[in-house]
Image (cartoon, rainbow, N blue to C red):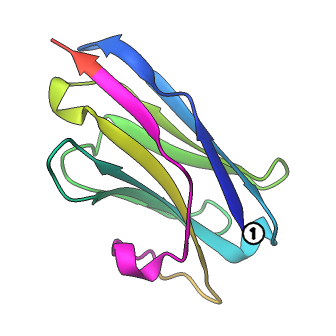
Amino acid sequence: VQLQASGGGLVQAGNSLRLSCAFSGRTFSNHEMGWFRQAPGKEREFVAVISRYGLSTYYTDSVRGRFTVSRDNGKNTVSLQMNGLKPEDTAVYYCSARAVRRTEMSTMLKDYAHWGQGTLVTVSS
């Protein structure tokens, strides 16, 4: 599996940004897709997950209501729409993939076998 994330950049607080992740190498619809982030000096943390066909999503409390994860199984892509960005959202954002046979929606880093290279999001105040 190869994952290529894109869309990061520098934005002012309150603005929006959309991250995308291109998946290749396996059957995309066999994988749940997660977004994680790592702020400077902090551990990588869970942000959002979407089920294989996009019917279920789950978010960490700090982004729920501001971020939306979606996927297009026809294009093998997953996206993270980030609205109302805050300085504390500044981090490197990683997309990740986990092959599953049933809906699991894991929020744990250790459960994801495949990771993209990360894209930097910087939110200025």
Question: In this figure, what is the number of numbered marks?
Answer: 1
In the rendering, at what x and y percent does residue 52 appear? 65, 69
Magenta highlight range? 105-122
In the rendering, at what x and y percent does residue 82 appear? 40, 31
- Residue at the image position 39 percent from the left and 55 percent from the top: 48
Q: Is residue 74 left or right of residue 59?
A: right
Q: Is residue 70 above or below residue 7?
A: below
In the rendering, at what x and y percent does residue 74 appear? 85, 51
- Tell me the quarter of the picture where residue 16 sits: top left
Residue 118 in the magenta stretch? The answer is yes
Of the 4 image quadrants, the one containing the N terminus is: bottom right
The residue tagged 1 is 29
- Residue at the image position 36 percent from the left and 72 percent from the top: 109
Name the foreground residue: 30 vs 57: 30
Residue 108 in the magenta stretch? The answer is yes
Can residue 13 be seen here? yes
Of the 4 image quadrants, the one containing the C terminus is: top left
- Residue at the image position 56 percent from the left and 54 percent from the top: 116
- Tell me the quarter of the picture where residue 106 sits: bottom left
Q: Is residue 68 above or below residue 49?
A: above
Can residue 16 be seen here? no
- Secondary element at image label 1: helix
In the rendering, at what x and y percent does residue 7 appear? 55, 28
- Residue at the image position 71 percent from the left and 60 percent from the top: 2
The amino acid sitting under disc 1 is Ser
